Image (tube, rainbow, N blue to C red):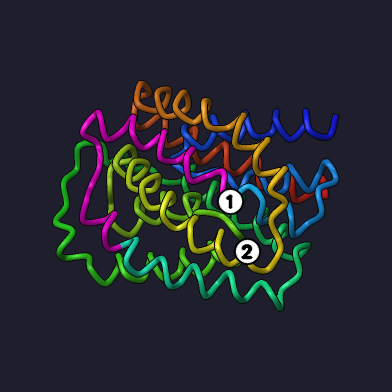
Amino acid sequence: MHWIAIALIGAGVGYLGGLFGKGGSAIATPMLAAIGVPAIVAVASPLPATVPGTLVAYRRYHDSGITNPRVVRWSIAFGIPATALGALATRWIGGGFLVKLTDIIIAIIGLRVVLRPEDHEGAHHDMSQHTGRLVSIAVVVGLLSGLLANAGGFLLVPLYLEALRLPIKTALACSLAVASVLALPGTVVHAALGHIDWAVTAVFAAASIPLSSLGAKTALRMQSAHLERVYGAGLLVLGVTFFFLR
């Protein structure tokens, strides 16, 4: 039953990851912890599974011509070293604290997105004017991604929306591309520290990867304003629920 539960969590997280433009490890962490997976293992083990899942989902957006290469390049360039640094810091920060922090951040971001009145569909912005913002986003998200052992998607999307004023679907596409890369240094560091249970990772990935593509397909078919509200409400409900259940 333990492995069945992990597979079901992987399937649900894969779908939500594709729908919300993220790898899904931030959602997976509290769910795995809730079924008895040790805290630090719940934090780190979903991370490797996010790489193929996010790439599969991103392919959907790329084929539809929805992406911003400049945002992706700058986010990756500054996010990778910050992610490695954040992952190293987990040697001195307990897994239980990281699980709680994940819940709080998810809820706050969800509320912020729900309360946003604007719909930026169709907006076009010169990213060359926002280089400083791009670098700041990459560094902050990278550090938190390493600490929380996730690919950063749950932070990237709202920051892209707020700081860069990207349309929701472009923000989702860029988030998936960046998340697939930012998961790599965190995976290497956490594996070296012995935090990853590869059996958990394998079961989780087998169930999540096929559903990631379906989630992205669903998002592409939704109206942008509706998608943005669903995104924020989903994060808010998940964050609050997991915080009070644990």
Is 241 one of the magenta-colored residues? no
> N-terminal of the two: label 1 or label 2?
1
Q: Does residue 44 appear to the left or right of 209 in the view shown?
A: right
Majority secondary structure in the magenta region: helix
Residue at image mark 2: 190
Using a 10 Å C-alpha cutoff, classify the residue at mark 1 as few (fewer than 14 neighbours), some (14 to 19) or many (20 or more).
Answer: many
Q: Name the disc covering residue 47, or none.
A: 1
* Residue 136: x %, y % from top left: 36, 71
Mark 1 vs mark 2, CA separation in Å: 9 Å
Q: Is residue 241 visible?
A: no
Query: Looking at numbered disc 2 in the image, what kind of residue is underneath it?
Result: His
Q: Secondary structure at mark 1?
A: helix
Camera-nearest residue between 167 and 99: 99
Which residue range is magenta in the image? 47-74
Q: Quadrant of the N terminus?
A: top right
Above or below for 139 versus 1: below
Q: Are marks 1 and 2 in contact (CB under 8 Å)?
A: yes
* Residue 194: x %, y % from top left: 71, 64
